[in-house]
Image (cartoon, helix red, strand yellow):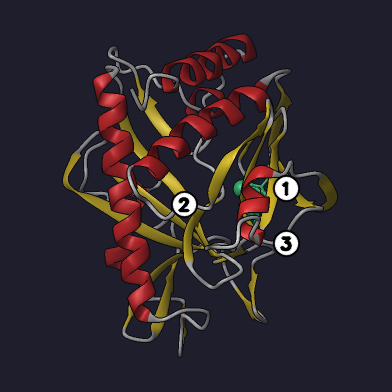
Amino acid sequence: MVARNSHQERTLTMPHQKDLLLAEGKTKRIWSSSLTNKHVIIESKDDLTAGDGAKHDIIPGKGALSNQTICNVFECLKAWGLPVAFFRQYSATEFIAEHCAMIPYEVVVRRLAFGSILKRYPSYDKGYVFPELLPEFFLKTSGKKWQGYGLPVDDPLIIFSQNRGCLFRPDQPIGQQAPFLILDDFPLQHSPKEIKDIDQIAIRAFLEVEIAWRKLGYRLVDFKLEFGHNVDGELRLADVIDNDSWRLLDEHGYDVSKQAYREGEPLEKVAANYRLVAQRTELFCI
Ligand SMILES: Nc1ncnc2c1ncn2[C@@H]1O[C@H](COP(=O)(O)OP(=O)(O)OP(=O)(O)O)[C@@H](O)[C@H]1O
Ligand SMILES: [Mg+2]
């Protein structure tokens, strides 16, 4: 007979208790669980930021709306078989996820050409539809530094070539620049195969979320993902997908995502967008 009450079973059934604050970013707090070191509790805050924190506001209730959106999106991705760190909702503003060692990339997938891509590829008109999804990797840096190297900009575009990572300015045409830095023997934390795996998971996740939105009459323009390794070293789609992560157009072409905030819409309108998106994602998995 299989012994019941295994560690995994207890973890699934016993209540997690929020323990120590492990990290706090602009929009989230990461808490350890007193039950297990395999999971963390991720709390969404009411903060809304743009331009890497240059613009900052608080929308009361935004944390709960973000958490509702995250849980609705990740419940579906999990049901569709994607390897997500998301485990389950914990409270109105929190969810439980596998504790990951984060991989320092922002992976952006695009269906339509909006935003910084127009600077890198000026030949694309705004709104150009990529018949095949376009994934791009950006190295997450801060203070214009990466492991002792000085950088001209933060969050450079990284293009992998064999075992090397070529860094480019994200705000200038790719065709008119050479990499400003080539990192040899890169990526260090993972195999080149894992780059392919990340690429494929990102594309599959986009296709699933795109279809879910299309059924509700919305157009998913692009989104940003982060990946990590769980405590067993397995690759996971981690962090969050919420209304801050994507551009999303309604049937009139109006952007209901954080983009409205970036473009200076009044906070009440922005808050209404977050409510609308959280409510609509309730219908995602049906
Ligand atoms: N499952 C997870 N396990 C461990 N850390 C995670 C997990 N999911 C997300 N994180 C990390 O939690 C941190 C805090 O989130 P937040 O997005 O608020 O930070 P931030 O200020 O935007 O900074 P960053 O640019 O690193 O995202 C991020 O660094 C994120 O990578
Ligand atoms: Mg973040």
Q: Quadrant of residue 230?
A: bottom right
Q: Which residue carries the number 1 mark? A: 25
Q: Is residue 171 left or right of residue 136?
A: right
- Label 2 crowding class (10 Å Cα cut-off): few <14, some 14-19, many 20+? many
284 up-or-down from 137: above or below: above
196 up-or-down from 83: above or below: below
Q: Is residue 182 left or right of residue 266?
A: left
Task: Indicate the quadrant containing the C terminus: top left, top right, bottom left or bottom right.
Answer: top left
Q: Is residue 118 left or right of residue 11?
A: left
Marks 2/3 in contact by CB < 8 Å: the verdict is no
Name the kind of residue labelled 1 in the image: Gly
Front position among marks 2 and 1: 2
Q: Which mark is residue 37?
A: 3
Q: Which mark is residue 64?
A: none
Q: CA distance from mark 2 to mark 3?
A: 17 Å
Classify mark 1 as within 8 Å of ligand 1 or not, answering yes or no: yes
Question: Mark 2 vs mark 3: which is more N-terminal?
Answer: 3
The x, y position of residue 34, in whole percent, is 82, 53
Classify mark 2 as within 8 Å of ligand 1 or not, answering yes or no: no
Name the kind of residue labelled 3 in the image: Asn
Marks 2/1 in contact by CB < 8 Å: the verdict is no
Question: Mark 2 vs mark 1: which is more N-terminal?
Answer: 1
Q: Is residue 112 visible?
A: no
Q: CA distance from mark 1 to mark 3?
A: 20 Å
Say which element carries label 1: loop
Name the kind of residue labelled 2 in the image: Val
Say which element carries label 2: loop
Q: Which residue carries the number 2 mark? A: 84
Say which element carries label 3: loop
Q: Residue at x 69, y 29 (%)?
A: 93
